[in-house]
Image (tube, rainbow, N blue to C red):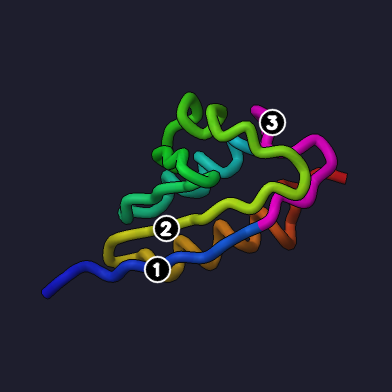
Amino acid sequence: MGQSVFETEVEIKNTDGLHMRPAMQFVDTASTFESDITVSNGPTSVDGKSIMEMSMLAATCGTKLKIKAEGDDAEQAVKELKILVEEKLFDEE
């Protein structure tokens, strides 16, 4: 049986974009899941569990990113990461 794959698109809404603190929050959340998580900004795709790779996305306010998770908990991973990015805004003011 194949692994579950879920994708969603999110928009960076916090003013300073995806700088190191929110990128670390994303990595910390992504790392709680067993699924492989990939984040894409146009043609650039990176490992959502790597702070070094996430920082390469150069995602500013308004940037749309695609989050893809593949594995047994992929659906939950995508849901929680979308909430972190678009609803909690990385807990920034």
The amino acid on which the numbered mark 3 sits, given as a three-letter code, is His
Secondary structure of the residue carrying tag 3 is: loop
10 Å neighbourhood of mark 2: few (<14), some, or many (≥20)?
Answer: many
Closer to the chain start, of discs 2 and 3, is 3
Inter-mark Cα distance, 2 to 3: 20 Å
Q: Is residue 42 left or right of residue 72?
A: right
Q: Is residue 14 left or right of residue 51?
A: right
Secondary structure of the residue carrying tag 2 is: strand
Residue at x-position 42% and y-position 70%: 75
Mark 1 and mark 3 residues within 8 Å of each other at the beta carbon: no
Q: Label 1 belongs to which residue?
A: 6
Mark 2 and mark 3 residues within 8 Å of each other at the beta carbon: no
Magenta residues, dominant SS class: loop
**Residue 55 pos. (x, y %):** 56, 28
Q: Which mark is residue 68?
A: 2
Rendered view: 90 above or below 18: below
Read off the magenta span: 11-21
The amino acid on which the numbered mark 2 sits, given as a three-letter code, is Lys
**Residue 33 pos. (x, y %):** 38, 54
Inter-mark Cα distance, 2 to 1: 6 Å
Closer to the chain start, of discs 2 and 1, is 1
Inter-mark Cα distance, 1 to 3: 25 Å
Q: Label 3 belongs to which residue?
A: 19
Secondary structure of the residue carrying tag 1 is: strand
Rendered view: 70 above or below 47: below
**Residue 71 pos. (x, y %):** 28, 62
**Residue 72 pos. (x, y %):** 28, 66
Closer to the chain start, of discs 1 and 3, is 1
Q: Quadrant of the C terminus?
A: top right
- Hey, which quadrant is residue 84 in on the image? bottom right
